[in-house]
């Protein structure tokens, strides 16, 4: 065990790459029904705005994506501090 890694991918028996399809399915399973409904409402809202003004819809989509990245980063950091991730 060198370089700070706990286990190499060979020791775990997994590959370092995850296909996009399996990652998407895993994400949808973890979200649950309420999370999927939230995603549908989010996409519908941006679609409604896009039907009126495409530039504003693009800006709103960037804001939502940025907010999602910030929240993911904060939660990952918090879980690492607790030793859970």
Image (cartoon, rainbow, N blue to C red):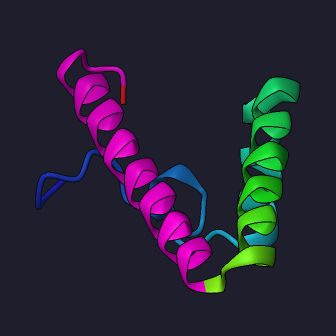
Q: Residue drawn 50% across and 56% down?
A: 64
Is 64 above or below relative to 26?
below
Q: Quadrant of the C terminus?
A: top left
Q: Residue drawn 80% across and 63% down?
A: 48
Which of the 4 image quadrants contains residue 77? top left
Is 55 above or below relative to 37?
below
Residue most extreme to the left: 3
Is 38 above or below relative to 12?
above
- Which percent across, then down, holds residue 32? 82, 28
41 relative to 75 in the view: left or right: right
Closest to the observer: 51 or 71? 51
Closest to the observer: 31 or 82? 31
Q: Is residue 71 magenta?
A: yes
36 relative to 15 in the view: left or right: right
Residue most extreme to the front: 52
- Which percent across, then down, holds residue 43? 77, 58
Stretch in magenta: 55-84
Q: Main secondary structure of the magenta part?
A: helix
Q: How many marks?
A: 0
Closest to the observer: 7 or 54? 54
Q: Residue drawn 34% across and 31% down?
A: 75
- Which percent across, then down, holds residue 63? 43, 61
Q: Is residue 6 magenta?
A: no
43 relative to 6 in the view: left or right: right
Residue most extreme to the bottom: 55
72 relative to 30 in the view: left or right: left
Which of the 4 image quadrants contains residue 34? top right
Closest to the observer: 75 or 50? 50
């Amino acid at each position: 065990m060198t370089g700070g890694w706990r286990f190499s991918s060979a020791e775990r028996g997994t590959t370092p790459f995850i296909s996009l399809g399996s990652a998407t399915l895993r994400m949808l399973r973890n979200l649950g029904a309420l999370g999927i409904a939230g995603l549908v409402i989010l996409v519908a809202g941006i679609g409604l705005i896009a039907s009126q003004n495409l530039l504003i819809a693009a800006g709103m989509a960037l804001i939502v994506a940025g907010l999602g990245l910030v929240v993911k980063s904060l939660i990952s950091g918090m879980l690492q501090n607790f030793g859970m991730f």
